[in-house]
DNA sequence: ATGGTTGCAAACACTTTGCACATGA
DNA sequence: TCATGTGCAAAGTGTTTGCAACCAT
């Protein structure tokens, strides 16, 4: 009963964030939990429809914004003119965006904390977060 | 006559890109030339108005898109839900975005080419470009 | 019971497009 | 001259908001 335990975890997460466990919220949280790419709202809605959970787009935007506000998710942009959302719980990582097929993969092993320290020292700019994305061709698209 | 020489350079740049030298294009190119931050379309239009160059927003969007297509400018996003444009001629650099006052400053001394080589080796992903932005508090906003 | 959530519709911000007119080379 | 560029208005995305009805706690 993997699904059930995931649902249970999601309910706890919502409770911890002082959010009510509604079907749409649970489904979105589960979706983000099992997906390894940041998702846009259109994709989330499509997923909900397929699973017979109807949810207005306004609701979905409100949910992901609320999640982001409460620290459950992170909002990112990949130079597309729209936002994507991913779980905030994931360890610090960045993305490889294939310009041909649109595939997005994570990379986690890039240490830029040294760079941030330099910036704070040299510029007096207190770094709170950063965005680092790479664009190019994934291995399949190079063939 | 600094202005005149800048204008002259801009005209050449446009000619090299096979673009006609219209007043709006020249003005936008000059603006980007003398500005050290990536600019959004609203800001560009405001500047044009102040200088009595009327240009429809559709025209400005067409111009910056054409510039980007021809390699004169780069289109970037700073997690704002809109695009900004800066000269492509600028050397590889990134931005420090102050979350309080919105100020944007450039940083150029961050060597991530080593990182890109690693990615190509480890992931087989051919990196063509990257986006790296830092968000936080600029020195004035920390006081 | 009641405050947080939702659906719906309307509005919003940003960007693109179609077409007739205008203009730079 | 004539391909290229522009203004205008309309439409296209992605996102937010007001308000009444609804539902999880």
Image (cartoon, coloured by chain):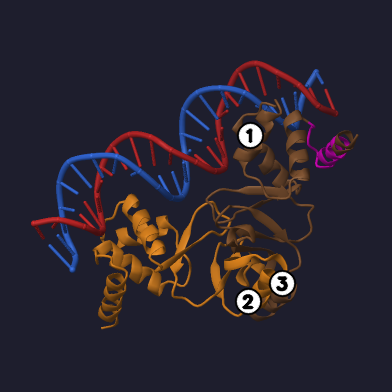
Chain colours: A brown, B orange, C blue, D red
Q: Position of residue B63 (x, y in %)?
A: 34, 59
Q: Report crowding for label 2: few under 14, some 14 to 19, many 20 or more residues within 10 A (C-alpha).
A: few
Picture quarter containing residue B71?
A: bottom left
Q: Which tag is nearer the camera, tag 1 or tag 3?
A: 1
> Mark 3 or mark 1, which is nearer the start of the sequence?
1
Query: CA–CA distance between discs 3 and 2?
Result: 13 Å
Answer above or below: position of B2 versus A64.
Answer: below
Instruction: Give how far across and how far down residue A143 sits, in percent.
Output: 59, 61
**Mark 1 crowd level (few <14, some 14–19, many ≥20, 10 Å Cα):** some
Read off the residue under disc 2: B113
Q: Are marks 1 and 3 on the same chain?
A: yes
Q: Does the residue at mark 1 contact the one at mark 3 (Cβ under 8 Å)?
A: no
Residue B63 in view here: yes
Residue that label 3 marks: A112
Label 2 lies in what chain? B
> Residue A8, how many percent across, how many down?
88, 36
The chain containing the residue under callout 1 comes to A
In the image: residue D25, left or right of residue B1: right
Q: Which residues are magenta?
A: A7-21
Real-space CA distance between mark 2 and mark 1, rounded to the nearest whole angstrom: 38 Å
């Amino acid at each position: 009963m993997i699904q059930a335990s995931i649902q249970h975890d999601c309910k706890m997460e919502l409770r911890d964030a002082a959010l009510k466990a509604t079907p749409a919220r649970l489904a979105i949280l589960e979706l983000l939990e099992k997906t390894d790419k940041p998702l846009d709202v259109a994709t989330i809605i499509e997923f909900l429809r397929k699973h017979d959970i109807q949810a207005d787009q306004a609701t979905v935007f409100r949910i992901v914004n609320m999640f982001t506000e409460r620290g459950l998710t992170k909002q990112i942009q990949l130079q597309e003119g729209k936002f994507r959302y991913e779980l905030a719980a994931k360890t610090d990582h960045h993305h490889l965006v294939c310009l041909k097929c649109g595939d997005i993969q994570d990379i986690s092993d890039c240490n830029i904390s040294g760079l941030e320290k330099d910036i704070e020292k040299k510029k007096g700019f207190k770094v709170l977060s950063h965005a680092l994305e790479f664009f190019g061709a994934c291995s399949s698209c190079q063939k």
